[in-house]
Amino acid sequence: VERRHTLRIRYAEVLLTVNDHDRRKALKMTQQQLAERVGQERSYIARIEEGESDVRLSGLLSIAEALGLTLSFSPTTELATAVSYDM
C-alpha cells in the first residue's frame, strides 16, 4: 500500500504539498543529514517540521529533491468549488 507523504502549507489559494518529517524518518535520515543535503542548518529543518517557519518554494524544492519526493499543486476545496467551467 502506497502511503502519501504530505505536509500542507497554505499559500493564497494554492495548497502546496510535500512532507519531510515522515519521509525523512522512513529514510532513517536525521534532521542534520537532511539539512546538509539542502545546504541549511538543522534548526531550519526543525522549524519547518514543527510548522514554525514560512518556507520559500526554492527551499521546498530542495527538501523534496533530497527526500526523493515531488511537489504537487492543487486547488483548495474552497477554490475548487468556487470555480466553474463553461464548455
Image: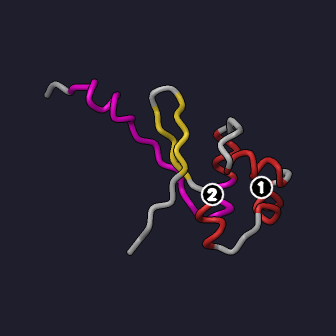
Task: Identify the residue shown where x is 69% and y is 52%.
Answer: 62
Residue 73 is a magenta residue: yes
- The residue at which mark 1 appears reads as 38
Can you give x and y, in whole percent of width and height, for residue 29 in the image?
72, 70
Question: Gap in Å between the C-alphas at discs 2 and 1?
Answer: 12 Å
Whichever of callouts 2 and 1 sits on the residue coming sooner in the sequence is 2
Mark 2, secondary structure of its residue? loop
Residue 59, quarter of picture:
top right
Q: Are marks 2 and 1 in contact (CB under 8 Å)?
A: no
User: Tag on residue 5?
Assistant: none
Mark 1, secondary structure of its residue? helix
- What amino acid is at disc 2? Asp
Can you give x and y, in whole percent of width and height, for residue 15 in the image?
47, 38
Task: Identify the residue shown where x is 77% and y is 61%.
Answer: 31
- The residue at which mark 2 appears reads as 20
In this view, the residue in front, 86 or 32, is 32
- 4, above or below 43, in the image: below
- 77, above or below 28, in the image: above
Can you give x and y, in whole percent of width and height, for residue 66 in the image?
68, 62
Question: Residue farthest to the left?
Answer: 87
Coloring applied to the structure: secondary structure
Task: Identify the residue shown where x is 38% and y is 75%.
Answer: 1
Residue numbers of the magenta segment: 63-84
Q: In this view, does 54 lie to the left or right of 75?
A: right
Q: Is residue 76 left or right of residue 81?
A: right
- What amino acid is at disc 1? Val
Residue 74, quarter of picture:
top left
Q: Is residue 61 left or right of residue 84?
A: right
